[in-house]
Amino acid sequence: MLRLRPVLSGSSAFARPTAALPLLSALRLGVRRALLALLSAVLALPTLLLSPAVTARAHVPDYPVPEGHFFTQTAASGDESMLGFTVSNSGAVPLWSEYTRLGGIRTLGYPASQRFIWNGWVAQVVQRGILVWHPERGRAELANVMDDLSAAGYDDWLRTAQSIPAPFDVHEEAGLDFDAIKARRLRFLDGNPQVKQRFLGERNWEDLYGLPVSFDESDQVWVLRTQRAALQYWKVDVPWARKGTVTVAQGGDLAKEAGLLPADALSPEYPTVFRSAQPEVPVRLTIPKLKVDAPIVTFGLDQLEKDGSLPAPKRANDVAWYDYSGRAGEANNAVFAGHVDWNGASAVFARIKELVNGDQVVLTGAGGTRFTYEVLGCDDVECHLPLSSTPNVDEFVGFSSFAHLTMITCEGQWDRINRDYSNRRIVRARLVAITSGQGAPQPIVAEPLPYSSWIFTADAPNLVRPN
């Protein structure tokens, strides 16, 4: 048992923020300490002593949304920006599925535009190029953006600003079939072994680069132009590359820099809050990947003991939920805690460290509705909390404007003297779908992120305050 720190009378740490900023900060600080004490009590751990911290934004660089994913990495306002671009399957155009199929971030880079129409097709800019949906083929492909730049008259700019040569005269290939043209173009690679290795080292090089178009050489660089990018082997040190390295000038970045793309499509989107119109008290937590299907035990402020302590769950496989945190489907942070072990055996949250981006957590509400959340993996947030540190706990257990959940358990080395674990494991997930108890999809409310949630972000100076 553990005595709780005081909480401001009549307040809730998880209510939608509407108060003046000084009061809001004080409120969150008080409840942050109180909630951490609650979590420590549930897990039979001592309280972490926290230094004051800024109000949390529960911000990660990219996160799942219904039918897709939202990315902030290419927004112009910096690392703390909440502006970004959504890649989705909406409108029966599965760009998110195709982006994933083609390799996602590793292969295509981050999205850098909203959807727009390109040569009559739905398209979206990624760093690698322009991803275009072809309904007649049932798939998306990268556009031949270097060819498009030529057609728009940018060859002189490419040569002077980027050291990329103009295409060779295609009339030299008159009368050749595609296989003969392909073989001829691939022989361009023989001019530079390093570029050849980099080009053919991509398993799906034809999807990423298209065919070689031309090559050129100067005292500084050997350049291969392709239909979708340019590969450059540097013969001297330059500010952006060392001698002997190969860099890739990505088609999407070149199209943006050249001004080839519509300006409105390049404007970052405001984030959207997705939530349920009818949140429910969670009664069961399911993690399909881990085969976890656990009952939820509710703890509230009205259950505090006379000495201010909160009883821990009585069973190894119960999950604790705090009824003053978010409900299932609510635009708030629903906080859960569970044991990692119990009397020498594994407990309910023993394996949550195995969860990664894309794994699902399902909350079943008291009304039978199922709320599906998608994990934000540990590459996005600090998932270990050493007891010796002073982490910003608001980042994990404080209010959120988004509908997400936070799961907390113990981890690390067991200290036999203090009878405590050295670390905490934090896993978060964002709401992506709602279904009835019979599996029928239910509508999700979509609304702009409230202005009050922007005031601590890098974008605040650029935002217009609503009337």
Image: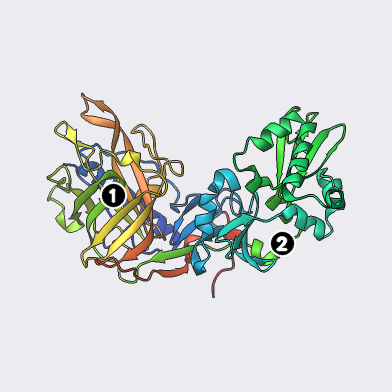
**Residue 365, percent across and down?**
24, 63
Q: Secondary structure at mark 1?
A: strand
- Residue 371 falls in image quadrant: bottom left
**Residue 3, percent across and down?**
19, 44
**Frontmost residue, 142 versus 182:** 182
User: What amino acid type is highlighted by mark number 1?
Assistant: Ile
User: What amino acid type is highlighted by mark number 2?
Assistant: Leu
Residue 188 visible in the displayed image: yes
Q: Residue at x 50, y 51 (%)?
A: 62
- Residue 261's disc is 2
Q: Please give left or right for residue 206 compared with residue 368 in the image.
A: right
**Frontmost residue, 227 versus 414:** 227
**Residue 355, percent across and down?**
35, 43
Seen as rendered, the residue at the extreme bottom is: 467
Query: Quarter holding the C terminus?
Result: bottom right
- Name the colour scheme: rainbow
Q: Residues within 10 Å of mark 2 (few under 14, many from 20)?
A: some
The residue labelled by disc 1 is 287
**Residue 412, percent across and down?**
31, 30
Q: Residue at x 34, y 71 (%)?
A: 277
**Frontmost residue, 317 versus 153:** 153
Query: Quarter holding the N terminus?
Result: top left
Q: Please give left or right for residue 347 compared with residue 213 in the image.
A: left
